[in-house]
Amino acid sequence: MKAVGGALSATLIAVLLAGCVLPQREAPRGAPIDAQALGLGAGAPLAPVAADWWKSFDDPQFDALMEEALQRSPTLGQALARMRLAQAGVQADIAASRPGIAIEAEETWQRLSEHYYIPPPFAGDTMWIGQATANLRWGLDFWGRQAALIRAARSRALASELDVAAARLAIAGAVGQAYVDLHEATGLLDIASRTQAQRERLLELTRQRTAAGLGSGIELRIAESAVPAARALHLQAAAARDMAVHRLAALVGAGADRYATIGRPTLALDAALPLPGRLPIDLLAHRPDVLAAHARVDAAIAGRAATHAAFYPDITLTALVGTQAIGLDELVERGSRIYGIGPALHLPIFDAGRLRAAYKGATADLDAATAGYNGTVLEAVRQASDQLTLEASFSKQVTAAAATLQGASRAYDLAGRRYAAGLSSQIVLLDAESRVLDARRALLTSQSNRLRARMNLLLVLGGSFDPGAPR
């Protein structure tokens, strides 16, 4: 009989294995881009950047705003919350791979059937039936499914940690841009104030000349109309400055009560920053968003492996020890002890395509993660290349704008003296003044653009992110 039972068991197992759901061939359609084909070998490795690189600009207000933004930003708070969620997922997957022990106890007041396996005198009576057991359950990971799930969870957690670093860079960039905007808006407001004062002085001088018979009524009307126009430009510049303040306050997580506390920037425009002249060879290793995208590819690979392992039998070891009895008094008796141990087998035979769909979806998820990684890599190279080009261009523009302003200022001084002496017309003076104002605006804009480009270049190269630092 034992031989017959063994043969039947072997036959049953063979039938189950023959009829189980088999994995399908579903190859990924994309591959991560080769960094060697991106032209990153031209520059030297990146120099280390201080964690508080913004202090190079020697502006205490900028330092305080940056620190406040990095502590209170809602964007960073969201990234940190996602990181904690991913870390909890790792702990959950690790816990699922280890043995689990649970205590179960129950007592039921029940009438026992007279036509069941329970013999007299209990049959037909109503009494307590109880059981108290300690149960062990341990999934034996023969095919590596649980290990793959843990790898996927760890990769997702790493990606979320890198997202926090990327969020810090993004916040630092946003605050830096907003602060440079405030610097530029404040400078434009100064130019507008000087313009208004110059136009008012010109109006007074024209009135004096007209009263002395040296000027015409037309010149007086032109001078009078120039003052309201200058006041309008001053109002526009003041509004732009106020909006820059509002933006900064929002970035640091503050409201309207903070507007009055944000004062005039005192940025050192020529602050020394460790900026390369060409694309560095290790650009991708210093970009947390690139590393996060790569970690998501690793997570997708592990997730695909886990769905592939789901096609194979799931074997679980179960065990129990406890007591079982009819009647409350008997539950603690020595003879009421029960125990048992044995394997449990789960083998998919027919699942209506669920496993194949999951495997196909995991492959598509891997393709999406790969495409996302490739897009992030190409965008990182484009951003770095753009900022290198802009920084070089704006540096040249600053030099040209400074020379233009110097020449325009000399011409304006000469025109002013000639006009005061009655040797030149008002139109010549106004034209010279307009050229000076345009040159001042151009120089301020070029300096601000160069400062933005230098900050952006520092950030697109990874800023103070250290890929080797523990997170």
Image: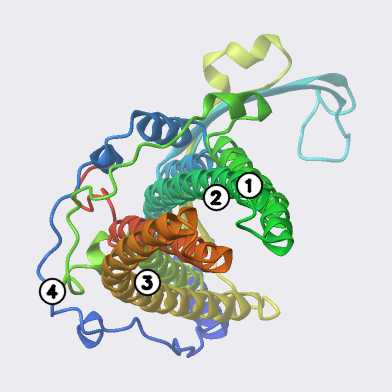
The residue under the point 38% across, 50% down is: 169
Where is mark 1, residue-wise? Answer: 234
Q: Dots 3 and 1: beta carbons under 8 Å?
A: no
Earlier-in-chain disc, 2 versus 1: 2
Amino acid type assigned to the residue bearing label 2 in the image: Thr
Which sits in the foreground, 411 or 330? 411
Amino acid type assigned to the residue bearing label 4 in the image: Gly
Residue 43: mark in rendering:
4
Q: Is residue 107 left or right of residue 5?
A: right
Where is mark 2, residue-wise? Answer: 195
Label 2 or label 3, whichever lies nearer to me, is 2
What crowding class fits label 2: few (fewer than 14 Cα within 10 Å), some (14-19), or many (20 or more)?
many
Q: Dots 2 and 1: beta carbons under 8 Å?
A: yes
Earlier-in-chain disc, 2 versus 4: 4
Labels in figure, total:
4
Amino acid type assigned to the residue bearing label 1 in the image: His
Amino acid type assigned to the residue bearing label 3 in the image: Gln
